[in-house]
Amino acid sequence: MITRLNISGIYVLDQDQALGFYVGKLGLEVDTDVDLGFMRWLTVRVPADPDRKILLERPGPPGMSGENAAQVREAVTKGVAGGHLFFAVDDAHAAHAELTARGVELTEEPTEQSYGIDFGLRDPFGNHVRIAQLKEG
């Protein structure tokens, strides 16, 4: 039966721009970057968590037709494509300050929630990203 989640994916419109954001701004690292001919297989990961990867996938063949890809690109741009990433940090306020210093456009200040302290942002393509300092237990 299923034993773990290995790769999750989000749609991005430009994989090089996605690398600049996820690696250059958020501090993730490249796991795999391979040109398969019919597509570029590009995954990144949190450096401290090498077992879980994020596929940064361009909408298009072989997974979908050109017409469907255009619709997905439009939905991604509007922020309604369902792309969400949730990251954990030890100190939400410090992470917020560091990302601000790196030039990341943050949509929220760190806010106390029932589960901890979190804040949000959107990547350059409209995907939602949340960063949380979770409460123990």
Image (cartoon, rainbow, N blue to C red):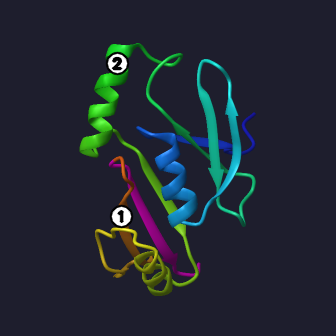
Task: In the rendered structure, find residue 68 and report the number of the disc placed on it.
Answer: 2
In percent of width and height, residue 135 lies at 52, 81
Residue at the left extreme, as displayed: 78
Q: Is residue 12 magenta?
A: no
Q: Amino acid at mark 1?
A: Leu
Q: Is residue 37 above or below residue 52?
A: above
Judge from the rendering whether residue 48 lies leftward or rightward of residue 82; answer left or right: right
Q: Is residue 128 magenta?
A: yes
The residue lying at 44 percent from left, 86 percent from top is: 93
Q: Quadrant of residue 82?
A: top left
Name the one closer to the observer, 11 or 134: 11
The residue lying at 52 percent from left, 45 percent from top is: 16
Would you say residue 59 is visible in this rendering? yes
Marks 2 and 1, how far apart in space?
A: 26 Å
Assign a secondary structure to mark 2: helix
Would you say residue 10 is visible in this rendering? no
In percent of width and height, residue 108 lies at 29, 73
**Residue annotated with mark 1:** 121
Q: Is residue 94 above or below residue 58?
A: below
What's drawn in magenta, residue-wise? Answer: 126-137
Q: Is residue 1 above or below residue 70?
A: below
The residue lying at 44 percent from left, 40 percent from top is: 12
